[in-house]
């Protein structure tokens, strides 16, 4: 054996060669473990918050139901008060109820028009680019087949 310390000296059979460089899968595994260490506390906090939210859903639904009942009650009370005030002003309950019905009908018509406008906004594309993409997609679609069993009522 050569013990001169040269680097080009042959390696003894009992020595192990240096380990091979890590592969792609090892790198991905180390990256995953690093992300787990980095975001582990945030994930634990998120799971705790989701657990609290899951238990609070029932209370939220009950609170929403109570708020809806209270709002309907308040609306009916205000309508009754407005009807009484109109009856005092007109001097007749019939004219007061007719005027109140007319006001409610106008509010209903306004709500319907707003609903239709909102539905119209939802169907329109926001930009010309979206419009052209929608048109290209429509032109690329195959025509109606008519032979599918789903088409038959």
Image (spheres, rainbow, N blue to C red):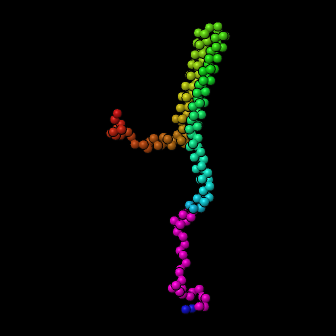
Percent coordinates x, y for residue 120 in the rendering? 53, 32
Q: In the image, what residue occupies the spot 57% across and 62% down?
A: 33
Q: Looking at the image, which residue sits at the far top?
A: 91
Query: Where, quadrant-wise, is the C terminus in this rendering?
Result: top left
Question: Height in image: 15 above or below 94?
Answer: below
Residue plotted at (61% across, 88% down): 5
Instruction: Look at the picture and state if 28 lies above or below 83.
Output: below
Q: In which quadrant of the rendered view does residue 139 lie?
A: top left
- Is residue 50 depicted above or below 17 in this figure? above
Task: Say which of 44 and 33 sits in front.
Answer: 44
Q: Give the residues in magenta.
A: 3-31
Residue 16 within the magenta-colored segment of the rendering: yes
Q: Position of residue 106 (x, y in %)?
A: 58, 20
Q: Residue at x 66, y 14 (%)?
A: 85
**Left or right of residue 117: residue 84:** right
Q: Does 124 lie within the magenta span?
A: no
Across and down, in percent, residue 145 comes to 35, 40
In this orientation, which residue lies closer to the viewer: 53 or 151?
53
């Amino acid at each position: 054996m050569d013990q001169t310390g040269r680097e080009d000296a042959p390696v003894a059979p009992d020595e192990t060669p240096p380990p091979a460089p890590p592969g792609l899968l090892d790198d991905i595994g180390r990256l995953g473990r690093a992300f787990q260490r980095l975001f582990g506390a945030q994930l634990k906090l998120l799971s705790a918050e989701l657990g609290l939210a899951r238990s609070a859903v029932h209370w939220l639904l009950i609170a929403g139901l109570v708020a809806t009942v209270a709002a309907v009650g308040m609306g009916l009370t205000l309508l009754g008060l407005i009807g009484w005030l109109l009856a005092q002003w007109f001097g007749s309950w019939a004219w007061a109820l007719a005027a109140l019905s007319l006001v409610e009908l106008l509010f209903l018509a306004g709500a319907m028009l707003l609903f239709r406008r909102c539905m119209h906004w939802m169907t329109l594309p926001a930009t010309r680019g979206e419009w052209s993409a929608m048109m290209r997609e429509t032109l690329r679609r195959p025509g109606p087949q008519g032979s599918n069993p789903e088409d038959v009522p």
